[in-house]
Image (cartoon, grey):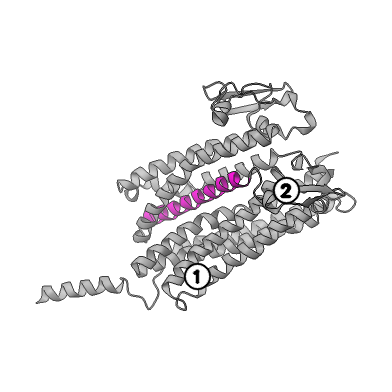
Amino acid sequence: MGVLGNVAGLARFQFALTVAFHFLFVPMSIGLGLIMALTSQRYYKSRDPRDLAHLKLFVKIYAATFIVGVATGVTMEFAFGTNWANYSRFVGDIFGAPLAAEALFAFFLESVFLGILIFGQKRVSPKFYNVSAWLTWAGSCLSALWIIIANSWMQTPAGYQIVNGRARLTNFLAAAVNNSTFQRYFHVVVALIAMGAFLAMAISAYYYLKKEHLDFAKKTMRLGVVIGLIASILMLPLGHLQAIEVADNQPEKLAALEGHWNTGPMDMAIIGWVDSAKQQTHSINVPIPGFIGLLTNLNTSTSFKGLKDIPTQNHPPLQATFQTYHLMVILWGVMVIVSLAAFIMERKDRIKDKAWAQKILIWAPLAPLAAIQCGWMAAEIGRQPWIVWGLQRTSEGVSASATVPPAQIIITILLFIVVYLLIAIIYLRVVFRLIKRGPQLEPDQPAQPAAIAGADTAEAAKEVN
């Protein structure tokens, strides 16, 4: 059956399209949320109107990102009842709980306190306003936790039993805290924090380049380089913990990630190409034989199951899994280099004078953004052919072709592309306009906080006398 007649393939592509677009905004909201909260903390301590202007700019960007993220996230939940009805019937008793919790405990927390940030600055106390910024960010992180819980259950199911062909929840805690939940959650959230830091650096670099809003640029750049470097370095141990989990629970995925054909010690490729026809992988490896064993249990002689000993029908798409994973690793290396260089240059106060560095930092957010997308694709493509690992195949979870014919899916894919392009253009125009305008002082606010202005006045009086 051709691709255009393959309901499962089309349904997967449509869902991947909607998830990929939605996941452009999640990193920006969670990542910038921390920058926004730290800026709020700075304003709470300084009461400097300039810091309030900086905070208001981040609030506006965050709000625009939040709105688009919510709108694009809803379509994915509808897909469970249309293209993936069989999957929904199989896991509905389990999958519904974290999705409901995400809406009740996380979405409302984030949206309520975001509303206070937008409309309540003059209506609540400074302390409550500052707390609202932190709770907005906490709500976004909590939202990510519930989604990761749901997705991790699909990777490493636990706390269930099969009753009449359906997965029934028997232990909520075991299902929520399954074998991969926390490894994946912290890996994802730190990656999103890195994304926010790179965006902060990019905005600051833009102002340096334009020689505008230099107070914002200096303060935000210092914040961004520190968070960006810490988050980029933390990705190594967190990625290592997730690799151990994959080795323990999904040996087929691990073999696909490294193009490992023969059972035995596994090398780690830097770049390469998987030749499925000849059952071999042409690659340039890390110059330490058995490096994956060293990473997982400090033993280079550790044996890992090879693809030749795994039934072909259980192989994930090998080329896509291998390439997306290694591209993610390469992009992580770029992030470390850029964040380290930016940290060193900012410590020496050189970024503001180097146009070439400013231009690099303006484009630098593309590295974490692409790395996040590649990491998601490697994890999800590597799970194939299972939609729920070891329990239900993707081909079994898709709605019947008679219920949702291929033509309807093709039409919706085209409509999604058109609508999402329109949303992306509107979003970019709004955000770029906000950034171009920059932080703006409130009309009734002085250019300096009262304490500073008072000190300046007193000093001037002394000079006159």
Q: What residue type is labelled 2?
A: Gly
Q: What are the residue bounds of the magenta stretch?
A: 181-210
Where is mark 2, residue-wise? 159
Q: Residue at x 49, y 75 (%)?
A: 120
Image quarter where the C terminus lies is bottom left
SS type, badge 2 = loop
Above or below, 182 relative to 287: below
**Relative side of 156 to 182, left or right:** right
Q: Can residue 360 be seen in this view?
A: no
Where's residue 3, x and y in %? 80, 41
Question: Magenta segment, principal secondary structure?
Answer: helix
Where is mark 1, residue-wise? 117
Above or below, 192 relative to 463: above
- Foreground residue among 46 and 245: 245
Where's residue 148, x and y in %? 64, 50
Q: Residue at x 59, y 39 (%)?
A: 242
